Image (cartoon, grey):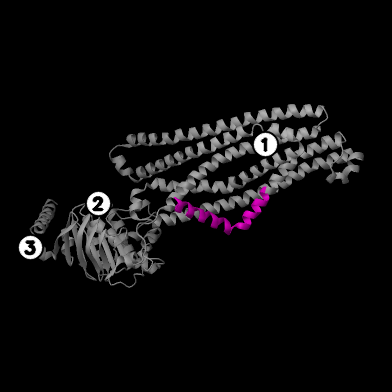
Amino acid sequence: MKQSSSKFRQIVIAHLLARKWNFAVAVLCTLTLSAVELLRPWTLKIIVDNILLSHPLPPFLAVLTETFERQKTLSVVLVASTVVLISVIKGASTYSQVFLTSRIGFQLAHKLRSELFTHLQRLSLSFHKRAETGELLTKVTTDTNNLREVFSEFALNFASEAVTLVGMIVIMFLVDWRLSLIALTTFPLLAFISWYRFHAIRESARRQRSAEGKIASKLHEILSSVLVVQAFGRERYEEERFELQSEATLDESIRTARLEAASSRAVDIVSAFGLFGVLVFGSLQALEGKILPGSVLVFAAYVSGMNGPIRSLAKLSAKISRAMASASRVSDVLSIQPEVEDRPDAIAANDLTGEITLKNVSFHYGDQKPILDNISFTIPAGKTVALLGMSGAGKSTIISLILRFYDATSGSIMVDCVDIRDYKRESLRGQIGLVLQDTILFGATVRENIAYGKENAGEDEIILAAKAANAHDFIIKLDKGYDTVLGGSGGTLPGGQRQRLAIARAFIRNSPILILDEPMTGLDIESEKALRDAMQRLLRGKTCLFITHDLRAAASADSILMLENGRITEQGTHQDLLRRSGKYQGLFLEKNNVIVATQSAN
């Protein structure tokens, strides 16, 4: 937690230092606001005591004595005009303060969002598998916005109210210490109310933010799985689950609102007792001539005015409590370190030939249950190896290890005879093209989705990649061709077309290593043929690890590995395995019989 707080603090301090002059002007405006707020009651005191009742002016205003004695009307106008002057100064100071602090706050929110987004992208895949997406979204959006409000609306307001309050107390003691003590008798109770409110609302806000994150996670989960929900007719069931989750947030929100309302009213009532004491005691003192009537008015104004800062401080403390809860949540994310990091002396993976070697590789996710057990094999540069195995055999784990989403528990993985842990992760992944079974496309144009495989890809490169992937013909038939914006995850396109765009994205990358994970699963015959043609062009001269259940596709590979329960049980060429592996031979014959039966039925 110390590390997280330190990193969060560094970001905030660096942001404020970069804008120190804006912050300094905002502080000056805050002090000006406090000063004019303290001066406001004195206008009335001077009119009552020094003009209407003709009491002598204080020494620092002695120069106006003659005017006050001989020209009462002018004196009233001059003194009353200070009210307008004070309002003008207050308006200008408020405008400058709000503008500058708002800008600082918005810039801070932008900085924190960017830092969080960058940090989240670099966290290990294991973190993202455990984390709830909606919770992360809430932290990046809602929590950073709460912190923005602290700086743009609350920080200097809090300081302004505090300075005004202290100034009122000091001036009251300078005017009459007895009235000041009466006015301050309510302070211990007011301080307790504010302290209690601060801590109670901070805890309530933490629970509220957590509940909101769970709602966002539930919403993300359901909307991303709406096909399954509707197909199984579970809309009502999900509505009830969502409503239960939402009720938890509702209850906590109502509790927070109740705390705020109760403490605000308590402040009003307690402050009223203080004003009552000042009015009674001050009026009696004025009747006895021990204090001027104007001084009673100043005290009454300050005691009434103190109610405002105290109430504001109480409200601001509640909002700062929420912001502290948000700051804690943001700090928690920033404290998480990637489980896979570059070594200090890591080198760039450039111009690889693509030879991949796994040597005695084992892996588990921390529960000591082995996913891979002593795996060893080599894919020579420019060759294709097909990896066969049932679901859960460990095929996808091998992909994750080669891409360094995880590090092997034991053993080593080498590319071009160099341990991949000695490469910089980003440069290593830049040498690997990837086509997955579940094609991931973005809600962007077709052009942008293809160009995603290569930074600064040119128009000619995009079109050539599309043609090589047998995608150009269907792309130009879309409403806006390459400028057509795809729906989320490319859901507006059939599966075969999505896969061809993924192939085009791999083409444009032109990487020496390719990983293909069941790219033809679920495709119709026409789409599969188009994809096979595209893949043949894609594989030329590349080192390829081809994960598949399709034995016909595996038969064309240079070598076949059979994976079972995290172990390589058979390996060899298609012909070798047909001769010596009864299991492979049985699978291949079964597959051919199914194909013949399907063709006969058609």
* Image: magenta residue range: 1-30
Within-10-Å neighbours for mark 1: few <14, some 14–19, many 20+: many
Write down the residue under mark 1: 306
Find out whether the residues at labels 3 and 1 contact each other: C-beta distance under 8 Å.
no
Q: Which residue matches tag 2? A: 368
Q: Which residue is at a point 35% across and 35% down the rendered structure image?
A: 241
Of circles 1 and 2, the one toward us is 2
* Depth check, front residue: 374 or 461: 374
Picture coordinates of residue 363 (x, y %)?
A: 25, 56
Indicate the amino acid at tag 3.
Arg
Amino acid tagged 2:
Gln
As shown in the figure, which amino acid type bears the numbered disc 1?
Answer: Met
Question: Is 16 one of the magenta-colored residues?
Answer: yes
For residue 580, the mark is 3
- Based on the displayed image, in which of its 4 quarters is residue 396 positioned? bottom left
- Circle 2 packing at 10 Å, graded few (<14), some (14-19), many (20+), is few
Q: Position of residue 339 (x, y in %)?
A: 35, 57
Image disc number at residue 291: none
Residue at 9% from the left image edge and 62% from the top image edge: 578
Residue 130 appears in the figure: yes
How far apart are labels 3 and 2 at the CA level? 34 Å
12 displayed left or right of 73: left
Q: Main secondary structure of the magenta part?
A: helix
- Relative side of 342 to 585, left or right: right
User: Observer-nearest residue: 561 or 209?
Assistant: 209
Which-is-in-front pick, marks 3 and 2? 2
Please determine whether, in this image, residue 145 is positioned above or below residue 293. Answer: below
Residue at 60% from the left image edge and 36% from the top image edge: 191
